[in-house]
Amino acid sequence: MWVLPRLVKLGVLFTRKKMEAFIRGDQSGTVLDRGIVSGAHVLGMLFSPDVKHTPTMVRFYARRTQKALECLAELLKGKDYRTTLQSLMMTASVYLLIHMTQTGQLYVQKSCDLIEAGGLRFVPTCGRPPEFSEELHETLVALSQTIYWANYLYLMRGGPEPRATANLEREFRYELQVGGITISSCTSG
């Protein structure tokens, strides 16, 4: 439960149904990827002042970390780009928050590669944007968090120039419907 109010800082948003599974600690994987739940356990232990570093807790932490990373590895083999992006962003956020910058940067790059491979965008290349929904909101948050971390790494940590997110950021700024105003150009190809 410690992680719940900190999800926003991690750039994570869940649909109502996923949030309910998250709160229950659902490990079935039917509603929410079990790696995300295991990762939340790790985060809770990392940042909670009440958790003592006993041998039992260290083993629990190691098992949950391994489980979360194994689940992420499985996601990376599949085609569920939205869930994978969300998991990658949560992982990148954790590593960056615990000052493991190079590892965090690796996961940001994996996110950029996944966005390209999955064709994830803020708005479709042509045509009307989909109706705003909880699922779409979840994806938009993960895309935004990718832009944020890529820019942060470049500006604050001497990371690579955020070329992989430049088009995505331009799309966010100029083509996404914001406040009832849409600036959009339909391009072919």
Image (cartoon, rainbow, N blue to C red):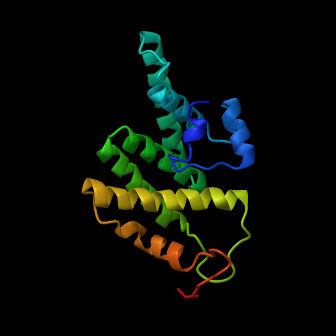
Q: Nearer the viewer, residue 70 or 109?
A: 109
Q: Is residue 28 visible?
A: no
Q: Is residue 35 visible?
A: yes
Find residue 94 and report its image quarter. top left
Residue occupying image coordinates x 54% and y 56%: 142
Residue found at the far top of this picture: 55
Where does residue 27 sit, x and y in percent of width and height?
Answer: 66, 31
Q: Nearer the viewer, residue 44 or 118?
A: 44
Residue occupying image coordinates x 30% and y 60%: 154
Find residue 155 and report its image quarter. bottom left
Image position of 53 (left or right of 83): left
Q: Nearer the viewer, residue 183 or 109?
A: 183
Residue occupying image coordinates x 65% and y 48%: 14
Where does residue 75 sit, x and y in percent of width and height?
Answer: 54, 46
36 lies above or below 131: above
8 lies above or below 47: below
138 lies above or below 2: below
Residue occupying image coordinates x 33% and y 56%: 153
Where does residue 84 sit, x and y in percent of width and height?
Answer: 54, 51
